[in-house]
Image (spheres, grey):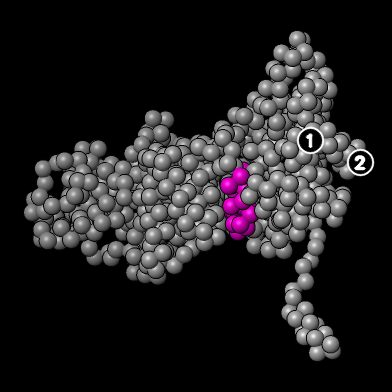
Amino acid sequence: MKGKLVRAEGHLANIIPIHLDASFFFERAVRSLDRNHVDKALKYFRKAVEYEPENPVNHCNMAGILSEKGDYEASNAILANVLEVVDPSMTECYFYMANNYANMDRFEEAEQALVTYLEEDTQGQFMTEAEEMMELLYYELDRPTKLNRIKSRKGVVEHDQARELLEEGKFAQAAELLEGMSSDYPDYLAARNNLALAYYYMGLFPKAKETIAEVLEQEPGNLHALCNLAIFHQNENRADQVLLLIKKLRVIVPFQHEQVYKLATTMGILGQHDTAYVHFRRLLKDEETAADPALAHYAAVAAYNTERYDAAERLWHYVSKLDPGSEVSRYYLSGLEAVRQGEQEPEKLSYHYHLPFDEQFRQWENYGNGIPEEMKNDPLIRSSFFWALRHGDRATKLQVIHALGMIGDYEVQQALQSFIEEPGEEQDLLEAARAVLNDLKSAEHEERNAQVVRPFSPAALKSIGKVQQSTSEQSEAHPTSHWQAVVDRALQMSEAKAELQQEMERLWTYYVAHVHPEVPGTKQIEGWAAGLEYLAAKNHSRPVTYQSIAERYGISASTVSKYAKQIHRVCNSNPPLV
């Protein structure tokens, strides 16, 4: 008997105790929901409420499950308790109650709850659904709903415009519009959340955090603000703050699509890929969002990042079916196969529905005529440029100044102007930015918005050359004037028309910005200039040979060929050299 007891005690000693708390039961509930085990999910949400009765989210999760089961009375009882006892500020509960009343054909009570929601809720996250319900109530009650105001509609037109600007990557214009709204509509928290995002995309992190703090001061549980703040903290490597916010976010199960999407992408960015996968899968099961190729890609990324490779493969094939013209699914399926074959190590993928930024940048460099229009307007690429302009190293900032000069729109001018006014930047970088900005401001409107690369003025070229020279380890061997001397020599020798001169300036500006820090030597000016002229002439389909160029410059044809091909390799111009 004693021996048996000892063995039993030894066996029990190997068991790891389970820490039962609200998070434990929340995880079980989410898992059950993902498997469509609604009754189990309800059971676990009830336990979460028992452990954290002061948390309104747990109550709302339980009410949502009861509503899905058709127990509308019980669902409304819980929602009423949230509003009366737990958290009266959760005005969205009125909308949930209106839905429940409508499902019970109690339309008078549904109308009362809906009006309260519209008149008291500041966010308006269910505005579309509320408008549809008002149409239903009008039909059922045979009269219009008496509504004094819609609190969340204040500033809605301006906010919609600002959101469009954000989606187009026009962050400075969006920020200007949203800044005006902040004073006119101080309770419009959605506008402030988007203002914080605009600041963030522009690299203005202190202002972004300050704006989010204002939102959370008014509404501590605002999901979008919590998600944004978590990403801001991650950017600052504040792991302790990120973990605290992850703990809050993991226990939230929103039912509105926009919030589920926001939470899913945020958790993915924060490295919580399992949680992100669960939420993305929930969205894909809904008819309204199941056919979205971007959403299917995000789910595939989450699956890949959690080593669910079979699921990732199925999802990327689904993306190909939904969006057959996209290169995204082909690119990632190829990478997945390389990982499976052991040809490359698996790396965590980012949650964006396009090719990785490095891959897109390489493709841009392959365009002989500059950045393609779709890349100019890509919000992520634009924000990456603005980010790097403020937080990159010296060489990166120079590349970005050059790239922004080729985009050259209002947004770029704002970013460069802000960069010039920033204290602490090195003087020669400021000069390069100022020269590019001056070029952009003096150019004609049509030229600023053209799809070809603009040739820079000699002042801009000299400024870029000055930065390249001072950055290079060989700077003392290469005077600043060398960069301009090459193109000046080519212009002098070619006696070309304006369009060919512009092509030579364009090619040389592009070349010097991309070979850094490998600076060409000063003793080969004739060779570089001859190669530059040859390449520019070929790009404009002029009849020219290496020998004809060589004779005018007094060098060999092989020297012209050598330097022309060096420039060509970097600029990747067309047609190919022969």
Amino acid type, mark 1: Asp
Of helix, strand and loop, which mostly describes the magenta segment? helix
Quarter-of-image position of residue 86: top right
Which of 379 and 73 lies nearest the eye of the viewer?
73
Question: What residue is shown with label 1?
Answer: 71
Q: Residue at x 37, y 56 (%)?
A: 334
Looking at the picture, does residue 386 appear above or below residue 5?
Answer: above
Question: What residue is shown with label 2?
Answer: 85
Magenta stretch contains residue 15: no
Is there CB contact under 8 Å for labels 2 and 1? no
The single residue placed furthest to the bottom in the displayed view is: 3
The single residue placed furthest to the front in the displayed view is: 1
Amino acid type, mark 2: Val
The single residue placed furthest to the right in the displayed view is: 85
Q: Residue at x 70, y 45 (%)?
A: 38
Q: Position of residue 202 (x, y in %)?
A: 58, 46
Tell me which numbered mark, 2 or 1, is placed earlier along the sequence.
1
Q: Is residue 454 left or right of residue 291?
A: left
Q: Position of residue 516 (x, y in %)?
A: 37, 61
Local secondary structure at mark 2: helix
Q: Residue at x 67, y 53 (%)?
A: 31
Local secondary structure at mark 1: loop
Which stretch did the figure color magenta?
Answer: 261-282
Which of 452 and 348 lies nearest the eye of the viewer?
348
Which of 349 and 520 lies nearest the eye of the viewer?
349
Quarter-of-image position of residue 474: bottom left
Which numbered mark, 2 or 1, is in the foreground of this view?
A: 1
In the rendered image, the quadrant that contains the N terminus is bottom right
Q: Residue at x 53, y 39 (%)?
A: 290
Q: Position of residue 549 (x, y in %)?
A: 12, 51
